[in-house]
Image (spheres, rainbow, N blue to C red):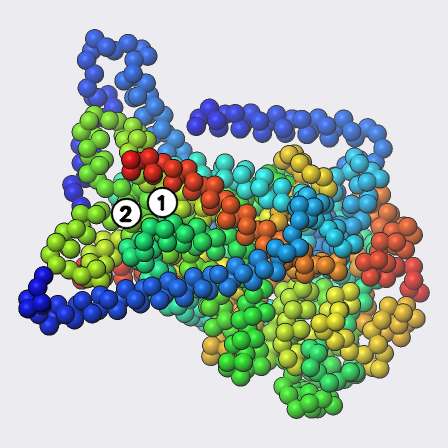
Amino acid sequence: MSTPVQQYVPKERQVLTPPAKRRRFSRSARVRFTNRLFTYYFWFSILALCLVLGLVIFFIGKTAFLTFRDISFADFFLSFNWTPEEEHYGAAAFIINTLSLTALTLALAVPVSVGLAVLIAEIAPGWLKNAMRPILDLLVGVPSIVYGYLGLTVLIPFLRRLSGENLGDGLLAAALVLALMVLPTICRISDDAISAVPKKYREAAYAMGSTRLQVMMRVVIPAAGRGIIAAVIMGMTRAIGETMAVVMVIGNTAQLAKSLFTPASVLTSNIVMQISNVEFDSTWNYALHMMAFLLLIISFVLILFIRYLGRKGREQA
Amino acid sequence: MSEWTRTRKMQRSLVYDRLATYGFYGLGILVLLLIFWLLLTILGKGLPGLSLEFLMKLPEDMDPGGGIGPVLFNSFYILILSLLISVPIGVGAGIYMAEYAPPNKFTEVLRICVESLSSVPSIVFGMLGLAIFAEYFQIGLTILGGAVSLAFLNLPMLARVTEEAVRAVQNDVKNASYALGMTKFQCIRTVVIPMAMQGIVTGICLVAGRAFGESAVILLTAGLSTSGEMWDFNLFSPGETLAVHLWYVQSEAIVEDARQIADKSAAVLVIVVLMMNLLFRIPLWISNRRLKK
Amino acid sequence: MKLFKKLTLAAVTSLVAVTTLVGSASAASGISGKITINGSTALLPLTLQAAKEFQKINPKVRISASGKGSVTGPQAVKKGIADIGACDWDASMDVPGFKAFEGQVANKVAVIPFATVTNKNVKVNNLTTEQLKGIFSGKITNWKEVGGDDADIVVITRAFGSGTRVNYQAKALAGGDIVKKAKNYKEVGSSGDMKTAVSTTPNAIGYIDLVYVNSDIKALSYNGVQPTTDNVINGSYKIWAYGYYMTKGQPTGATKAFIEYVQSAKFQQGSLKKLKFIPISAMR
């Protein structure tokens, strides 16, 4: 990339204007005024965003930390026993299940969606591009309970036949549904990132005799790396936070998923299944809020990790 | 390039290249088939019974033959209200993060916070909305509460997508505009935003589609009933949306034709999202075409 | 952009002003007011239908309803978010798992029968209390043991705290436990999901409000008695419960009028029966 020179941009007062033309409503005054106005506007937007952020964190956190009035840290994080009816609030199984479900979903979704993004952005002819983009956007709009319903009535009977299990619910079913749900998110944002790579990079690489595959793998994808990583992160956070569909296919049983077909429960599905059936002022409710807070922390850590991987990958390239 | 200059390595590269192209096309076809199957199942079940009457009639709880009129209207109304709130703020915040924010640790932490926010299950946003509007302001379950909570849900995603799109604009172009003596805002308005428009529109499409299909937030903040009349613009009416109605019909309703109503509602949702995408994209195509000429 | 914002703000404030004006003006005549109803989803079809009819008679009353879970009802009433909390049990008394809500009045509105249901491939037609207890506590795991084919029993149940589960456990299992198992066990979030899950999973057993039972699933007899409305009324089928509207103290104003409407003979014998609930007056 070329040198960023924004920091050398003259401050608004120094904008070159001949003193003779400095009337009150002159063009430059107006320009300076809107410039200042919109700087404030952008400031206001980011403050509003921070406010929402703070509000959510405060709202969840406030209730969440009441959990530890009644139970210890170790009980919550290390115990696998979640039977709130009997005052056991161990969330370890949910945490591990959430991590494995996320990993499984990404393993299924990322190669497919990035591959598809490359196809759309680099290989496909124009008409196909214009057709595929809206079709993918369409997938985003399918409500999650429709995904859940199809999962329940089509995918699970299929998996049941395939595996010979009695139920078929479990991590694999949930990961397949989630992968389909995050595919458009990851694909569309990576597609935009790949399309935004300047043409001259490609031309330079082709001029050196590279094949298209080489150009894509060595030049385009690394150059779009930042955007692709953002896409993966957004897909991942949606997968972590998705509920309505997961609830219908995962089995909702508070236990560690020892195989792909064990009926299990993740943080989100457990929150959704139980939060409407608990009393406001109970440890149970606090523990559920703690789990929501934990989701925030888990995704925070995972995002840092993906960023780190991405940076390392780019250094090697 | 004539035959004899091809080394073995080049030969291999060419074969790989060919294979990869087939591979990518294969993948694309596979995914497309999957998507078409999905759409066919949803639309195939719902479209045949669809009529204008179904789209305009009031929902029924007892007799078969209920429609989705007010529910569909509420869907649009809440979506538009929430976009009116979230788009200006989300895009503004995204531009701030990309153009104004100092590149320090705080900005970085803020960015990751914004990202993690999208992993909070939407039901938690619903509960936040419930706490703010029903408990604090005491206005009950309203369209206003639903729209604002939905905007909260969408803000982070919109801000992040905008930021990425703005960052992808090359520095050369910006530098060129600064060299012409533009102020920062002039540069953003005339250069950065038009170039990032495609990305921003993608963001809005993603967000709008998701908001249209969102049920947990609306269920808690706008309720599960309508005021029982069409074209009710009152911000303080209860505002059941189509997605919520779909959830209700699929999980609790006891009318005989619940399954058919669910199928039809799902089909309507998908069609509306498709049309919304086109609506957002057509102006973009036109302006792109004009740019190319 | 800025101007636009100001305009929206102005529009919103004027709308607020108009609605408050209209609201206060109409308070003078007839029954008027705003009723918010929250709580059990099982009672929701009834609530929505009643609200529609009631608003037709009293156009000045605005009713908004929502549903999430039984306990949400009395809780919302306690917090002042809702005027009426629909609940599948009497929340003014202790039930297993939930404490009584002090100062709330339970208004009976309907009788809800429940049924044990299985997938259609199951050959068993009748189960006794002891057999059901064995199945749901995980002691009986094969249909062979209760007179069916040699196949694993797949238990499908509602989440803890669901009104259906509370009532089913109390009435059908005589207070017996529903025990989590490592395999062949699944929890679902709503009556609709229960129906779909039982009808698509071979060898599955579950329980559901009688109104949802249709040809996709099979309803079993309980101790030899078929689950029908008549058997509930004549007292031979025991798995049923009252549905309640919880209010803070005795209901007043519009809320009172609405509950009275739901309890009136006109609604109980008309729409309520059509919705396949049982009128409260039918029970002795």
Q: In the rendered view, tell whether residue B77 sits above or below residue A264.
A: above
**Residue furthest left as drawn:** B5
Which residue is drawn at the image coordinates 54% and 39% (left, top)?
Answer: B80
Q: Position of residue A86 (x, y in %)?
A: 62, 72
Residue B199: which numbered mark, if any?
1
Disc assigned to residue A62? none
Tell me if label 1 and label 2 are in contact, CB under 8 Å: yes
Q: Left of B107 or right of it: where is C251?
A: right
Q: Residue A16, relative to residue B155: is it above or below?
A: above
The residue under label 1 is which amino acid type?
Gly
Q: Quadrant of the N terminus of chain C?
A: top left
Q: Residue B121, relative to residue C284: is it above or below?
A: above
Q: Position of residue C270 (x, y in %)?
A: 88, 54
Label at residue A196: 2
Q: Position of residue A232 (x, y in %)?
A: 36, 58
| Identity of the residue drawn at 67% across and 59% down | B260
Q: Residues within 10 Å of mark 2 (few under 14, many from 20)?
A: many
Relative to residue C106, is residue A66 drawn left or right?
A: left
* B87 sits left or right of C244 in the view: left
The crowd level at tag 1 (other Cα within 10 Å; few <14, some 14-19, many 20+) is: many
Q: Quadrant of residue A132?
A: bottom left
For disc 1, the chain is B
Residue, x 58% and y 41% (percent of image)?
A: B76
Q: Do discs 1 and 2 share a chain?
A: no
Task: Find residue A82 and report its horizontal and vertical position in percent.
Answer: 55, 71
Find the distance from the CA under tag 1 to the CA under tag 2: 9 Å
Identity of the residue drawn at 54% across and 80% down: A161
